[in-house]
Amino acid sequence: MERKTKVHAEEGKQEIIITREFDLPLDLLFKAYMEPEIVAQWMGTKVLKLENKKHGAYEFETSDPQGNVLVRINGVYPEFIHEQRITRTFEMENTPGSPFQFEIQLEFLDFEKVTSETSKLTMQIVYKSVELRDQMLKMPFAQGINMAHNRLQEVVNHLK
């Protein structure tokens, strides 16, 4: 089955470009990144903080069934333009035993209206080095982001 989320990584560059068209109006796609309850559902994580504003911050936490924290994700928003763009830092903590080195990355999320009922998300993720970007691509990154976007579409479909 073809992945709806497209991941493009040009050789020798420190970035990944991710695009996905959703069968959702722009306002609902953007809401999926703003409302803690919706974020928690499609990301499968606990939302500890979600300050949707310029210079705001966010913090998510994922635990195992016994309540042990597996990973914590956090960052800040240098830019937040309603229904247009979110610029954020992304830091992953608590990755014991991982063979991969995780550094803070910079993410640009651009939201675009395609039609009155469809919208597009373009994400540019910038890594500190080409090597770190390549490490991420060795993981099931493309599959994981496609699955997350599929869940986002399913969860937000119920809000239509």
Image (cartoon, rainbow, N blue to C red):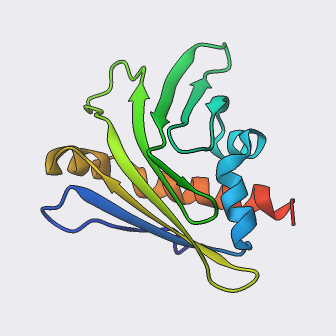
In-image side of 129 versus 138 (left or right): left
Q: In percent of the image, x 49 and y 31: which residue is there?
A: 73
In this rendering, does residue 19 appear at all? yes
Q: Where is residue 7 in the image (x, y as percent from the top left)?
A: 39, 66
In this rendering, does residue 4 appear at all? no
Q: Position of residue 70 (x, y in %)?
A: 51, 21
Quarter placement of the N terminus: bottom right
| Total residue callouts | 0
Q: In percent of the image, x 16 and y 51: which residue is there?
A: 130
- Against 23, residue 35 (above or below) is above
In-image side of 82 versus 105 (left or right): right
Judge by depth and name the residue closer to the eye, 4 or 18. Answer: 18
Q: Which residue lies furthest to the front in this view?
A: 54
In-image side of 132 versus 22 (left or right): left
Q: Position of residue 65 (x, y in %)?
A: 68, 20
Judge by depth and name the residue closer to the eye, 82 or 106. Answer: 82
Q: In percent of the image, x 63 and y 43: which residue is there?
A: 52
Quarter placement of the C terminus: bottom right
Question: Which corner quadrant of the image does residue 26 belong to?
Answer: bottom right
In-image side of 85 versus 106 (left or right): right
Q: Position of residue 134 (x, y in %)?
A: 22, 51
- Against 115, residue 59 (above or below) is above
Q: In percent of the image, x 26 and y 47: which residue is there?
A: 127
Question: Which corner quadrant of the image does residue 98 belong to?
Answer: top left
Judge by depth and name the residue closer to the eye, 118 or 70. Answer: 118
